[in-house]
Image (spheres, grey):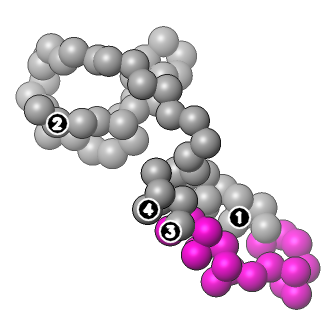
Amino acid sequence: MQEIRARYEDGVFKPEEKINLPENSVVLIKSLKVRGLLLKEDILEIKKVLETLPKSRIDFKKLNELYYDIKISG
C-alpha cells in the first residue's frame, strides 16, 4: 500500500507529489485531516514573504531549522 498526500481543491484530490499509478486506477481514500504541520510548500511561501522584509530582520538559518524541526516531529 502506498501513502499519498493530497489536497482537496475544487472538488478534486490533487497529489502533492508525482505518483506512479496507471491511468484509470481505482484507489481508496481515507480522510486524515492534518493539522499543525507546515509543508515544504508552506515554508517556501513564508520565506518568499519574509524576503520582502528588511534583511536585518530575517534569520534564514533559524527558518530552515524550524522547518526541519517541524518536519521531523510531524
| Secondary structure beneath label 3 | helix
Instruction: Determine the residue positioned at 79% across, 67% down.
Output: 50
Cα gap from disc 2 to disc 1, whole angstroms: 32 Å
Foreground mark, 2 or 3, reads 3
Label 2: which residue?
2
Instruction: Determine the residue positioned at 9% across, 28% down.
Output: 22
Q: Residue furthest bottom?
A: 56
Instruction: Determine the residue positioned at 61% across, 59% down.
Output: 43
Label 1: which residue?
48
In the displayed structure image, the side of residue 51 where residue 20 appears, left or right: left
Q: Quadrant of residue 27?
A: top left
Other residues around mark 4 within 10 Å, as few (<14) / some (14–19) / many (≥20): few
Disc 1 to disc 3: CB gap under 8 Å: no
Cα gap from disc 1 to disc 4, whole angstroms: 22 Å
In magenta, the rendered stretch is 51-68
Cα gap from disc 4 to disc 3, whole angstroms: 6 Å
Foreground mark, 1 or 4, reads 4
